[in-house]
Amino acid sequence: MPRKKISYQEFLHREYELHHAPFEPEMDFYETIRSGDTKKLQALLKEPFHKKEGLGILSKNPLSNLKYHLTITTAMVARYCMSGGMSLAEAYSLSDYYIRLADEAQSPEEISEIHDDMCRNYAQRMQSLKRSAVTSKAVSTCINYIFEHLHTRITVETLSRVTRLSAPYLSRLFKKETGYSISRYIQLKKLETAKSMLTSSDYSIAEISASLAFPSQSYFTNLLKRDTGLTPKQYRDRNSGHLTP
């Protein structure tokens, strides 16, 4: 089946624009996973996913309906975890893995098992992430801003205005807490997204480069080759359709 051609914004927000369960409990659920609160999550998972009330009707086929809702939930969890600091590559790799499992599921009970395993996996990874890297509010604000604006040219001065801190102080603080300069961190996040777009969409290399605001396609190609040893075409050919849990 050909992969769907999508824009950067569609790629960033894929598959999670529809859900019909009550808003506040849903947001609390996603926040629980993002915070890595595995104990609270275990309590929230007592009700099997396939018996959950409030799911909208996205398909007349009950099993397909559950699959669609699991896809939406998985994409939402991935999005929340990315905003909490999980790398795009890791979040999307997990998302693709569990969505593929859902597609192959044969029963409502199997869908529930996949759902619970997906939630626990993300939460455990977020718990480990929180323990290994505690950042200040300013740096967290920067990281969230960077994620939301990967399609633009982001500068230290831009982040300085967002956080209301001087550029020199913010640069030192960011490097101290993340281990990366601001420019290098932005570069890495753009590369992570580009890799996911190469393997998860039919966007051309030129379109990916432009959508992530790289200075030029040749700059993007050289950057990826320096990072992976592969050109964008070679990376796409080698990794398209490859899923890892």
Image (cartoon, rainbow, N blue to C red):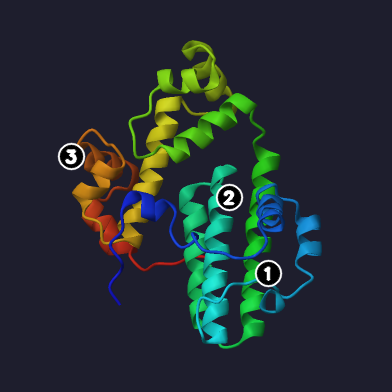
Question: Which labelled disc corresponds to residue 126?
Answer: none
Measured as percent of width and height from the top left, residue 229 is found at: 29, 48
Q: Relative to 230, say whether 16 is above or below.
A: below
Alpha carbon separation for disc pair 1 and 3: 43 Å
Name which residue lies at 64% across and 30% down. Answer: 135
- Residue 218 circle label: 3
Q: Residue, x 39% and y 39% (percent of image)?
A: 150
Q: Is residue 4 depicted above or below 224 in this figure?
A: below
In the rendered view, tell whether residue 199 sits above or below residue 57: above
Mark 2 or mark 3, which is nearer to you?
2
Badge 1 crowding class, 10 Å Cα cut-off, few under 14, some 14 to 19, many 20 or more, is some
Give whichever of discs 1 and 3 has the lower sequence position: 1
Residue at numbered disc 1: 116
Residue 34: give x, y in percent of width and height: 65, 49
| Foreground pick, 140 / 68 | 68
Write the residue at 47% across / 65% down.
96
Contact? badges 1 and 3 (CB < 8 Å): no
Alpha carbon separation for disc pair 2 and 3: 32 Å
Q: Of callouts 2 and 1, which one flags the residue occurring earlier in the amino acid sequence?
A: 2
